[in-house]
Amino acid sequence: MPSGASAERSARWSARTGSPRPHHVVAAVLGLVVLVALVLTGVVPGTGPGPGSGAAGVGARASATGASGGAGGTAYASSRPSATPPGPLTVVGLGDSVPSADTCGCTGYVEQVGTQLERLTQRPWVVHNDATGGWTTTDVADDLLTSPTREHLAGADLVMVQVGANDFDLGGVADKACLPAATSDCWSPTLAGLRDGLTRIIHDVRLVDTRPDLRIAVLGYWNVTLDGAVGRALGSDFVLGSDALTRLVNSTVAQVAAGTGAVYVDAYTPLKGESGERDPTGDLLGDGDHPNATGHTLLRTAVIDSLADDGAVTVWRGLPR
């Protein structure tokens, strides 16, 4: 309706003339329609829809001291949910035939981890699997000096390393003279080399990728040699000796992880159980040496659980830790 000076003039006109002429009525109605339209669209200051009105579905008004309004200004905050954090993220696999999965004919745990992290973080992941069957810690360390591995590592958010089984001459596994494994000269030189090699790998990865939020996950083994039905066929001394050496290797890998700030992933318990009495035959290929599809899924779960415990999954999801 008319307000201010316009209302006063209208009142004076009515007092002088009684009732307006027809064409004046039409003009007055048109003027009222225009004014109402201006009020509803907020063009007329101070009369538009306020906060909490129906217009809030498009944008909610912030105060003049809001993030973008400035003094005396008006800011609008979108009611849409915040966008997914930017991506993609990158995972790199390093090591021997287990992470490479080249004998499995299945999707290996490195690729499975990438897929699972996409689901958990709602962000895309790129997977580079640079593991190679038969490699030792020295082979992996040397590979970090080459392209394309260095290029993959330069943008990595997660690096998974599983290597060391091929460092050992396993011909003495069934030799009782090599027990107890922790004090035997059969293994001590190789264990020292494994410790130094893993430490060098982690150090060199961080030289390539210097971001402080890089996660490096280092996996142990369920067995550094044959296991399940294939391993048992070689006799009780072989079973006892291989298990003792595997536990010692895993202890060494865990110590390196703790000393370098990496995440240790227990690959023993998922396939062998905490006591070592679980039969992993159903999770291995016919060679008794490499995981099959279910074995790789167990390893993937172990990696994801360890990263979740470390808080990495939460960070990658873009939430406060």
Image (cartoon, rainbow, N blue to C red):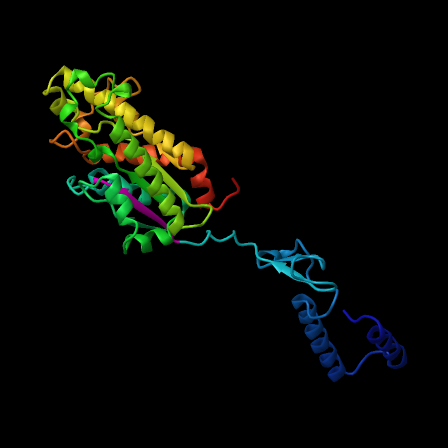
Q: Quadrant of the N terminus?
A: bottom right
Do we see residue 110 in this rendering? yes
Instruction: Point out residue 162 in the picture as x, y percentages from the top left corner.
Output: 28, 37
Instruction: Point out residue 13 in the picture as x, y percentages from the top left corner.
Output: 86, 79
The vertical placement of 5 against 145, above or below, is below
Q: Quadrant of residue 17?
A: bottom right
Q: Quadrant of residue 33?
A: bottom right
Q: Is residue 197 magenta?
A: no
The vertical placement of 51 against 21, above or below, is above
Q: Along the line of sight, which residue is nearer the eye, 69 or 157?
A: 157
Majority SS type along the magenta span: strand
Instruction: Point out residue 83 in the picture as x, y percentages from the top left corner.
Output: 48, 53
102 left or right of 299 in image:
left
Do we see residue 116 in this rendering? no
Q: Along the line of sight, which residue is nearer the eye, 94 or 21?
A: 94
Residues shaded magenta: 88-96
Name the residue rendered at 34%, 51% in the picture.
Answer: 153
The vertical placement of 190 against 182, above or below, is below
38 left or right of 174 in image:
right
Q: How many marks?
A: 0
Name the residue rendered at 17%, 23% in the picture.
Answer: 173
207 left or right of 57 in image:
left
29 left or right of 287 in image:
right
The vertical placement of 236 against 155, above or below, is above
Instruction: Point out residue 105 in the picture as x, y percentages from the top left corner.
Output: 15, 42
Name the residue rendered at 25%, 27% in the picture.
Answer: 222
Q: Is residue 92 magenta?
A: yes
